[in-house]
Amino acid sequence: MYIIAGLGNPGKEYTGTRHNVGYDTLDCLAEKYDVKLNKLKFNSVYGETFINGEKVMLVKPVTYMNRSGIAIDEIIKFYKIPVDNLIVIYDDIDIPVGTLRIRPHGSPGTHNGMKSIINHVGENFPRIRVGIGRNPDIDLADYVLQKFGRDESDKIRMIMEKAAEAAIEIIEKNIDAAMQKYNIKATGEQLRD
């Protein structure tokens, strides 16, 4: 069994904001697999499907971003899921809009939702970082709660679709295959680490 978690904040006022890219990517995935995210348990809204014969929970923690680890920990403990079967999709201010970075494990960087998850379950799980960029002229808290500009909308929609595909690739093949295929620079070219 796998968990694909998209991080964000619940509430209409956060819909479409930079900080909710994880939620929005999960919606892309749910649409692709015709999954209704309508179950409420484990401090999450979720739905279930099968990918490549594996049961997969698509999860949106509803604890607010900074407490995402509470929800993820509840699910992992209840179903006894190995931590490396958790895939987290989230926004990253440290990489440009339109960039996708996939990693097998690592630190949370500046992301408080990831800090919470790592504090609860450790760091040994794949993560998909969706670049939202940074604007030094705007307070960080205000910036991440902004909606994307018109000039960014197409780019962010495309990269969210790629992030959803990358999560599927991790389950169908493995993390290395996903990194090889989906680590993408803002220019559209693949990253070579």
Image (cartoon, rainbow, N blue to C red):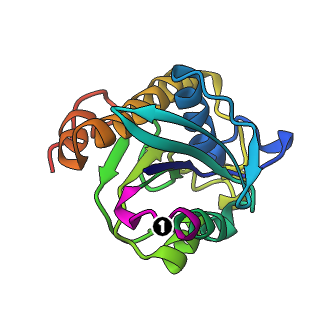
Q: Nearer the viewer, residue 107 or 144?
A: 107
In the displayed structure, 84 sits above or below 19; it is below
* Disc 1 packing (10 Å; few <14; some 14–19; many ≥20): few
Q: Is residue 184 visible?
A: no
Q: Position of residue 24 (x, y in %)?
A: 62, 35
Give the magenta-colored segment's residue range.
77-85
Q: Nearer the viewer, residue 144 or 158?
A: 158
State the image quarter where residue 180 is shown: top left
Q: What residue would you read off at disc 1?
A: 80
Query: Residue at image x 56%, y 27%?
Result: 28
Q: Position of residue 40 (x, y in %)?
A: 77, 49
In the displayed structure, 75 sits above or below 22; it is below
Q: Is residue 2 visible?
A: yes
Q: Amino acid at mark 1?
A: Lys
Query: Residue at image x 61%, y 31%?
Result: 27
Q: Position of residue 20 (x, y in %)?
A: 65, 45
- Left or right of 6: which side holds 174? left
Query: Residue at image x 68%, y 61%?
Result: 65
Residue 83 magenta-drawn? yes
In the displayed structure, 109 sits above or below 55; it is below
State the image quarter where residue 111 is shown: bottom right
Q: Position of residue 176 (x, y in %)?
A: 18, 47
Residue 107 magenta-drawn? no
- Left or right of 15: which side holds 58? left
Query: Residue at image x 33%, y 32%?
Result: 52
Q: Residue furthest bottom?
A: 119
- Left or right of 160: which side holds 39? right
Secondary structure beneath label 1: loop
Main secondary structure type of the part rendered in magenta: helix
In the displayed structure, 85 sits above or below 175; it is below
